[in-house]
Amino acid sequence: MRAGAMELTWLAKLACFASSLLLVSLACSGCGGETNTDHFYNEGGCDDWGCAPCCQCVCPDHPTEGCSEQALSSQCSDACCAKMPNTTGACNEGCMVAGRPYIAQQRSLTASLAPQLKDTRLPQGQPEADAWGFVRGDLGHHPAPGAGVAARVEDGGGLASQLMVEALRSAGLAANPWPEIGGSLGLEPHLPDLLAEAQAHLAASPPEARERWHGDGLAEHASVGSFAKLCVELLVAGAPPRLLRQAIKAQEEELLHAHISLALADSRKADASARTGLSSPLQFPEHSLDFKLDLVSMRRASIDEGLKGEGHSALKLFKQALEALNDQAPTQAAGPSALSKLAWAMANDEARHATLASDIVEWLSHATARQHPEVVVRSGAVEVTEL
């Protein structure tokens, strides 16, 4: 008797399951989520679920826990296609979009024309060169990597040139010792040889020097994320393509800086064959971000983190490059020269990053009703004075 009852119970559950599959295929036709038959039953069996099909919808207004009645009544509508494109599952056909979408809070975000005439927080009077899609627009093109700056101490020039000139003056030099070096991207084809030579030189240096490179490498690694964050902030602020392109390039340069610095720190291993980099991947701490249109905060960060922070990094690296060059004896191997080239290339990059910060502040000057501050490079520091 008990065996027969059990057979009937399982037959009923099987029938319920089959009918649920049919209902799911109908109910999920407008749902942006995916069919999930694992949610049909719990340990208590079909009766506890009422044999209701469950369409696991991704619409934030309709929770996915349990068997949602909204799915049965099609309340989880085609709006899901707009909110979560490119998801997998049976319910999302026709929702695919081209490219990799920007998903935030279960929504796919795209830009819209900024209401510049109605919102005084946004920069107005944008020149044609800053317009997206203008055939002769300014895309932030820079000279090809390797085209260096032949700066001399009597040169004026922009902020990047001023930073280099201050480093030369502090070292008692009259001209750029590496005019052919434009930045780290231009050195990339030669990195393996340059790093090996620099490692051999640093292997005989005090441990503190190598540890400093390790700390610098972790800071440069974090800067990759910092510039990624800046790119999104610029997008939210409605920045022109030239600023975004420079920020994207800066992110790539910081990646190389992290690799170079950590490789120089690896020279603490006396045996060259043991210099194989870090023993495990670098994992950045998980965190969350909230991007809001705050042009005043963006301006303040551009001054503190960009003009001052990147400017200080440029001066520091220029100094390290010149010290390595001065330490090289006429009969010495190429190690100090290689170290000098690497540091000089990174210093050029950091100087351009400071210039990018200056460009952002200038672009924001109308929206924030603040003039560009006075920036003076002297006595080994970057001084910023608000006007």
Image (cartoon, helix red, strand yellow):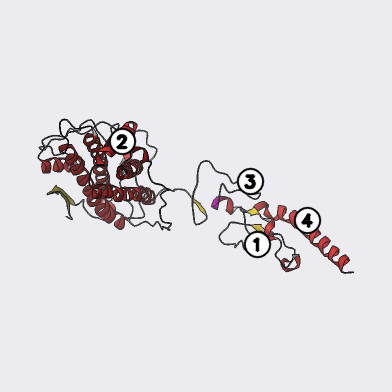
Label 3 vs label 1: CA separation? 19 Å
Frontmost residue, 378 versus 356 = 378
Looking at the image, is mark 3 or mark 1 earlier in the sequence? 1
Q: Which residues are magenta?
A: 82-89
Q: Are marks 3 and 1 in contact (CB under 8 Å)?
A: no
Label 1 vs label 2: CA separation? 63 Å
**Helix or strand or loop: what does disc 2 sit on?**
helix
Circle 2: residue type: Ala
Label 2 vs label 4: CA separation? 66 Å
Circle 4: residue type: Ala
Does 64 appear above or below 137?
A: below
- Which residue is disc 2 drawn over? 196
Q: Are marks 3 and 4 in contact (CB under 8 Å)?
A: no
Q: Is residue 76 left or right of residue 171?
A: right
Q: Position of residue 137 (x, y in %)?
A: 34, 36
Q: Nearer the viewer, mark 3 or mark 4?
A: 4
- Which residue is disc 3 drawn over? 93
Looking at the image, is mark 2 or mark 3 earlier in the sequence? 3
Q: Are marks 2 and 3 in contact (CB under 8 Å)?
A: no
Looking at the image, is mark 3 or mark 4 earlier in the sequence? 4
